[in-house]
Amino acid sequence: MASTGTTWKLADHPKLPKGKIIAVVVLDGWGEASPDQYNCIHVADTPTMDALKNSAPDRWRLVRAHGTAVGLPTEDDMGNSEVGHNALGAGRIFAQGAKLVDVALASGKIYEDEGFNYIKESFANNTLHLIGLMSDGGVHSRLDQLQLLLKGASERGAKRIRVHVLTDGRDVVDGTSVGFAETLEKDLAELRGKGIDAQVASGGGRMYVTMDRYENDWEVVKRGWDAQVLGEAPHKFKNAVEAIKKLREAPNANDQYLPPFVIVDENGKPVGPIVDGDAVVTFNFRADRMTMLAQALEYEKFDKFDRVRFPKIRYAGMLQYDGELKLPKHYLVSPPLIERTSGEYLVNNGIRTFACSETVKFGHVTFFWNGNRSGYFNSELEEYVEIPSDSGITFNVQPKMKALEIGEKARDAILSRKFDQVRVNIPNGDMVGHTGDIEATIVACKAADLAVKMILDAIKEVSGIYVVTADHGNAEDMVKRNKKGEPLVDKDGKVQIQTSHTLQPVPVAIGGPGLATGVKFRKDVPNGGLANVAATVMNLHGFVAPDDYETTLIEVVD
Ligand SMILES: O=C(O)[C@H](O)COP(=O)(O)O
Ligand SMILES: [Mn+2]
Ligand SMILES: [Mn+2]
């Protein structure tokens, strides 16, 4: 792989010892914001995290977790798990998918590269299908990128285009999918005006249709397959706007969980099943929620569900989603090459590593942490444990999720003394925060805090060190706000719930009996971000980070 030729040996830290057991805890979706009733972390009973903040001012600080600090195009881009864990694990800031696609579209290079030329072969006689998240959240995809791709493909010979939309409501406010569909339908109508046969062909809510991750529930992908490929779904409509409006009328309906639908013609026939000879692009740039569909579209041998029909297509991802598996083989934009991650360095320096989360976040502390790479660097020194997540429910129903099980696994790994680093992701603040259910998110934050306590207690027993941080905000702010920071209300006077991540900074806390007395946070890295954490952790393991890593957050005063 890309890392060959690297000198893996890390220099010894001049002042910090080796041999301490270090817990690295990532609270997913746990930012810092002003205390009010919509800050679930503030409202929840979180004595452990409160103590970290209040009892050791030199060992608690905030770092940036959004925008350019994590390789996103602008400071208006909220953080997310992919870019957050990439930065935490890699110790450097890489231009991320969102940015790379922007650049490739702006320069036109996207149309010159292998991926586009590969799918283009189908344009003359077949259909181009575009499948992905219809949103301007910028986490998995962006509508403006889809619009540019539609324009670019049609200008370069695509005569028949079908878009398979997934509605969001998770990275953007619930209900906004109607507006996105209106924009898209208008663009498609314009293309039709130019003689291009362009339509939406199917759709469904992202969490119920297609965008599962880490193989938590293949049924989700199957529902999408049936609509997108087979043209079969329980609901049939004439266009996407009508579909989404109608389906949202059902009690408790929301964008994230809309049922699958297909668009049919005047004879009731689906307008866009995927058939032999067609080209397909999955236009999400982010990997975790696209790899399952990518497997279904690409793998000849496949046993996750009955595909019924496996069309011979030309398939390309917006990016290659898994560099190790080379999945998919064809892609429009090269993914960021994130090599020489801290995990790989530390393992090569003998650090025995344990990583754990539940299914819905498992790849975050493994795949994303290791630079979008699946598998072990050295299976003798590493153990990754996945605790099965609940499936088929929304997480406000079980807001404690598997936090305690993760805490127990981490505790046992720490107490076993078999590992030098025990790394976990505790999902609750994020996964429950995304439901927009404030009561449940408060319960979630308390559960996460309890899991942290279990881990810190174990660290105490082995005289170890802890680093507690987060990947981006979510649970600390559950409402949309105006520029003055006041909650926005809708036309019925109800506060506008925010299901998405935030732009808030996140905490980093260090401590534990194994932490040398003179260690404290430096004052000269005021703009530190998540990427500064890797060098910090390397120092605590007794090593100096490589020169090109973002600087450490700590100093050792005598
Ligand atoms: O995929 C998701 O669940 C959201 O779009 C982003 O959440 P995450 O970045 O915390 O996974
Ligand atoms: Mn996250
Ligand atoms: Mn999230």
Image (spheres, helix red, strand yellow):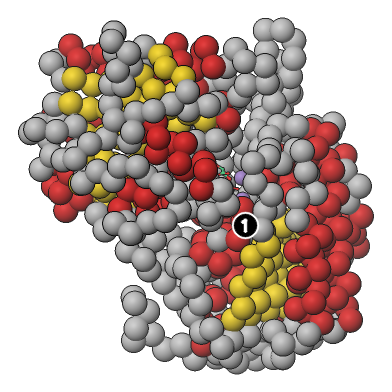
* Ligand 3 found in image quarter: top right
**Residue nearest the viewer, comparing 37 with 383:** 383
Left or right of 5? Residue 192 is left
Q: Position of residue 138 (x, y in %)?
A: 47, 39
**Residue nearest the viewer, comparing 133 with 305:** 305
Give the residue type at disc 1.
Thr
Q: Pointer 1: residues within 10 angstroms few (<14), some, or many (20+)? A: many
**Residue nearest the viewer, comparing 518 with 41:** 41
Kindly tell me whether mark 1's CB lies below 8 Å from ligand 1: no
- Is residue 139 among what the camera can see? no
* 25 over 120 or under it: above or below: below
- Is residue 302 among what the camera can see? yes
User: What secondary structure is found at the residue carrying circle 1?
Assistant: helix
Left or right of 365? Residue 345 is left
**Quadrant of the image containing the N terminus:** bottom left
* 19 over 92 or under it: above or below: below
**Quadrant of the image containing the C terminus:** bottom right
**Residue nearest the viewer, comparing 260 with 521:** 260
- How many discs mark residues in the rendered view? 1
Residue at 33% in and 24% down: 201
Q: Quadrant of residue 530?
A: bottom right
Q: Position of residue 115 (x, y in %)?
A: 20, 50
Q: Quadrant of residue 437?
A: top right
Residue at 44% in and 11% down: 242
Q: Position of residue 137 (x, y in %)?
A: 50, 35
Residue tagged 1:
359
Return the residue found at the far left.
124
* 138 over 57 or under it: above or below: above
Residue at 74% in and 10% down: 493
Residue at 34% in and 75% down: 2
